[in-house]
Amino acid sequence: MPSPGVAPGAADGAGAIAKAFRTGRALWLGDVVFAGREEGRAFAAPLGALPLGAAGGWLGCLVVVGEAGEGFGAEQREFLERYAEAVAGRLRGEADRCAPSPLLDSALRAMGVGSFALAPGTGLVETDQALLELVGIPENGFDGKTDTLLSYSVPEDVPALMSVIEPSAQTPGRRELEFRIRRPTGELCWLRLNCRVCKGPDGAPERVLGVVTAAPVLRRSASDVARIQWLTAALDDAVTVRDVSRVVVAALREPLDADRVALAELLEDRLAVTVLDPPGAGAWPDLWRAEWRSEWPDAPVAALPTLQAALRDGRMSLWPAGAVLEPGLEGIGPGGLAVLPLPAKSRVTGVCLVGWDAPHEFAPEERALLTATAGLVGQALKRAHAYDAEQELATMLQRSLLPRRLPRLPGGTAVARYLPARRGLQVGGDWYDVIALSEAKVALVIGDVQGHSAGAATIMGQMRTAVRAYAVEGHPPDVVVGHANRLLVGMETDLFATCCYVELDMEEGNALFVRAGHLSPLVRLPDGGTEEIAVEGGLPLGVLADAEFPLTALALAPGSVLALVTDGLVESADLQVDEGMRLVREALAAADPSDPGRMADELLGDAGRREDDVALLLLRYDGMRIRPVRAGWVVWRLPDAVMHARRFSARTLRSWDVVAEADTVLLVVSELVTNALVHTQGAVRVDLTLAADRLRVTVNDSSPRAPAKPVVVDWEATGGRGLFLVEAMSTAWGSVPVGGGKQVWSEIVVSRPDPEEEPESAPEPEPGQGAEPPRVEPERVPEPGRTWERGWGLVRDRSWGMGRNRDRNKGRDRTPDPPPGRRIHGRHRDRDQSPDPPPSRNPDRSPDRNPGRGRTRPDEGGPP
């Protein structure tokens, strides 16, 4: 009779069963077509029909259906015939039902097959003697408990065995798995388990029936053992997910002669492909190409039910040549496809696909190798994913603490490099920064906080922010470093920091250095020689609150390269600092300064990640091709202060040949100076800077509050329109904080006549109009020790000609004394209230035309 659940779908199958019953002889058929459980699906499999004899005739037939694509071997036929005899004996009542038939027992033992039956949830199992012999349990030493059998298995295989002993409602009806046991003698053996889960009407598992076979072919040969050992060692060295992917390709593709290998990591409900070999899109199905994003595609899990089932069940699936697969897997393994879930600690971390183009037979040794590889790769992939996540967080933290990009500098090029430490997080205490202080001044800073950890990175971020804040306020280098030192002392941390701060004048090449326990900077001279700059050092930051940090001055020639490094580049366990500095100097001398980026890479070398993190900052000083010209004026708080500021500006613009935009510039100067006088206290200074076709007007005052435009200005308002005028007349304008206050600036594009063109002669006056005789300017004699260029009005003295107002802190608390003979009538509130000059005088001339009296140069304080 047919077995339950098997419905022959062809006449030859039914006829074979009937013929075996009539003749009393076993019949074996190759491929018989059976109707599947789902409508419209059929499958072909070998069939065996064995009659069950009795004394008075035949009781029925034992029908056996084999695996698709595999026939019944001679050994299997012999076993099944003996099994049929034992079943017939049971049916005739000739054997004791409480004990296995001696004939069946001997057959099972001869075949090396043990059987078991268990009820889920009871913790008990019924076994035969053959199974106990496979495990190595004495005949009278088994207590019938599942825990006793599990105690002989390898711990890594216990989760898979538990899924058989305690199946769930979603467990498929048939299970097959390989597992390892360690016998009492210490021998490690592989066993194969096949079982069937019998479910009740409600779908809950009620009974599990299975057989266990010894698998001597699964015992590793010398080559298999070496391969597993190599794989274990390679995965142990693999740190990132990419490293694991490369090891998987090396372990599977060439040794198994496979044509394709894919590895995907399970991230929540999607698969992220980490490697495809071969990497070309043409080697993979069209469905995968449609999902191609950047380097690899996103595996279309929704369209791949085979992968979904493998990830859900955690079982390896082997598909022979000609197997019908969904379109998303058709082109991966037409000759054979292995789908390997990657288990790791009771969950699946990913899946590996191995495909062959030519027909491929999966030998037992190969199946064992794939199973062992999947377990090892799953553990390594989970570990690598955790490492990648940790490093991604550390990298994001490091990038947020270091500058994203360095500013473009007039007259120079700055580049920087950072390498994380070899051990621990890729985040440390090394930092660098390039701070543009003004149009012609830049600050370079490099530092190192003790350690390379998240705590060191936090202190590093705070120190970098503090140094930048103190620098942009306009403090000199020693004050900037002193403030940062007191800040670190006040943090009450056990960490200290080293720092090297450089302020460089890009016009003149003058540099000021401050060193707080850090390595001395290096310089590459234009002739190719290198030197270690002898900068007087101070204590590291965070050691002593009252520590002093002396200044060291040095003039750089155009073509020089300044190098600031941290100790990670020049010091290690086998490299002394002096030797490391010598090697860096040699590399600096040999590098090509025309490409600072390549020069930085050559200084780092090919050593890769080092024991300590490394920061490197290079600046190639080229000098400025076009040097700006400047003029400055300190505004006295007099009723006609705005008038004097306008006169100074008019004289300066005329000396610079700025004519067309003169009225615009004078309007901006008037509004900015008026705003500073009305809304602030203390000193006010106006500066004009001309660089190429850009004129910059800056007004400095002692108030830190930025100017704000009024929200509403109606037609009756008497003020509030000044900033709107500045915004309308300027190409750009803004406000920046400086030491002791703020600076409001305006930039205007100006046009200047070509110096090669001859100026047009002035038209002669018509008769009767009266020509004004030309004025003769008295010769101005410079004071001893100070010179200026005639015609530009640009003072070369570095003190900006502030004269009696050199100390801004002192001048901030009091109003400058008026010159003799003048009285201060109060604060000037409206530039329209200033007295106009007499009509007969030139408004751009000082009221005092007596050359014999003392005069003030345009960049000095006081009225003209």
Image (cartoon, rainbow, N blue to C red):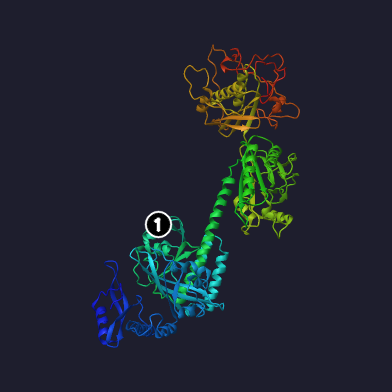
Given residues 43 and 98, the one toward you in this image is 98
Of residues 207 and 601, the one nearer the viewer is: 207
Is 677 on the left-hand or right-hand side of 288?
Answer: right
Secondary-structure class at tag 1: loop
Residue 478 shown left or right of residue 15 in the figure: right
Residue 263, above or below 664: below
The residue that label 1 is drawn on is: 291
Image quarter hosting the C terminus: top right
* Closer-to-camera residue (101/294): 101
Say above or below: 601 vs 732. below
The image shows residue 11, relative to residue 716, as above or below, that is below
Please identify the quadrant where the N terminus is shown. bottom left
Is 345 located above or below residue 132 in the figure?
above
Residue 681: percent from left, percent from top? 64, 23
Would you say 354 lies left or right of 763 here? left
Amino acid type at circle 1 is: Glu
Does the image show residue 255?
Answer: no
Q: Is residue 810 left or right of residue 121?
A: right
Residue at the spot x=26%, y=78% of the render?
13
How many residues crowd mark 1 within 10 Å: few (<14), some (14–19), many (20+)?
Answer: few
